[in-house]
Image (spheres, grey):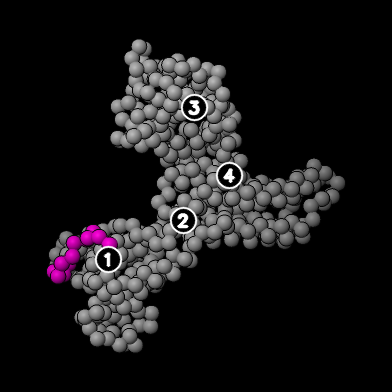
Amino acid sequence: MTNFEDTIIAPATPPGVSALAVVRVSGKDAIPTVNACFTKDIHHADGYTIHYGHIMDGSQKVDEVLVSIFKNPHSYTGEDAVEISGHGSSYIVKRIIETILKHGARMAQPGEFTLRAFLNKKLDLTQAEAVADMISSTSEASLQMALHQMRGGFSNDIGLLRQELIDFAALIELENDFGEEDVEFADRFKLQQLIDSLLQQIEKLRSSFAAGNVLKHGIHTVIAGKPNAGKSTLLNALLNEERAIVSDIAGTTRDTIEEIFTLNGIQFRLIDTAGLRESNDKIEQIGVNKALENIQKATLLIYLFDLQTTRPEELETELQQLPDSQHTIILANKSDEIDYKASDWPENTLFIAAKTKSITPLLNELNRIANQYEFGNETIVNNARHADALAKSSNILQKINQGIDEGTSSDLIALDIRNALYQLGLITGEVTNDEVLDSIFTRFCIGK
């Protein structure tokens, strides 16, 4: 079992060669532990001060460093903490850590610094999860969403929902205390009005999950079509690099190729797939099957066809075989190599020439899609755990409304309200358990 009284240490910067590296130490004995192997006395140093000196292993100098002091409760973890900035050699970092371990510290567990911040009420659970989201953010949109969560935007919304419910729960509980006197302190009509309002707010948060998932993970975008339609050429044109092998030989792409394309702060997770056709080549057919699997999972499907070799009725047959659950962009390729009438093709067809990188119509459409997910200051749910808790609380609140209509006793209504409060509390960590904490914090990097 983890002992949170220990002094912990871990590298806070990634391994590898760099100009600088940072080692973090936190715990009630963090300052005296570092002081024991530092050439300058920092035992009584003020918080938010930086001190120059050397880390010493006995009489041997390990590294020339700057030591930053943070005093509880005004630190990231809420404990006394020290950050050691040294040279970026992985060997030096290892020696600094080994030296401090000799003086009583232990290695931190993954996410233990942030877990201590949560336990010391420096962050709630949604803010702690936002720290991990910020570290892993790969686009402007995902970063801004994580920053909004860290500032407590989602926490505030959930807190308001819980408080309104708590106020009514107190009145219901009061009725139970006076059960023999048959009094009613909580107006059932007002309770139903409150629950209807809460359900609307919860549904608004739940409905934002799809957009939140896109902002966090990007749009799962599959490029599909028959062999030699120009899918790999299109991928290269979007990325502006020769990422995929391009050949006149049909069936060149036999496996999926995945790359990230960012537009207006939104990531499109591009997947170039094998050409769709029946094949006696077992390897190619495996690629086709993987392409079909990816098409089923796609949020956005870019279906590409060769304007020179495809007839309108053939395209119609191909499109009818595609799933109709996702957004589909129909792209006519090689439009610079043939005379064509746009009216011969589906109304929403876009015409491009991937080989010459004339793909402006596609970029305009992708830009329009990206703008739909533009992040403002509104609260957006981007965490499956949060979405699940909101769904469960919504079901419970609907059950309460039904119970009121059916004349359910106040003690059963109070039980359901407590269950709803429990689900909302799971989101922010006002109620939690070790399994939830382990699941969240073990996904953090070791120095955070």
Which of the two marks, 1 or 3, is nearer to us in this view? 3
Q: Residue furthest right?
A: 181
Q: Which mark is residue 428?
A: 4
Looking at the image, which is closer to me, 157 or 39?
39
Q: Pick whichever of labels 4 and 3 is earlier in the sequence.
A: 3
Marks 2/3: CA distance? 34 Å
Badge 2 amino acid: Ala
Tell me the element at label 2. helix
Q: Pick whichever of labels 4 and 1 is earlier in the sequence.
A: 1
Looking at the image, which is closer to me, 26 or 49?
49
Q: Which residues are magenta?
A: 240-251
Tell me the element at label 1. helix
Q: Pick whichever of labels 1 and 2 is earlier in the sequence.
A: 2
Instruction: Look at mark 2 in the image and give the residue it sits on.
Output: 141
Badge 3 amino acid: Ile
Q: Residues within 10 Å of mark 2 (few under 14, many from 20)?
A: many
Q: Pick whichever of labels 2 and 3 is earlier in the sequence.
A: 3
Q: How many marks?
A: 4
Q: Which mark is residue 237?
A: 1
Which of the two marks, 4 or 1, is nearer to us in this view? 1
Residue 202, quarter of the rendered image: bottom right
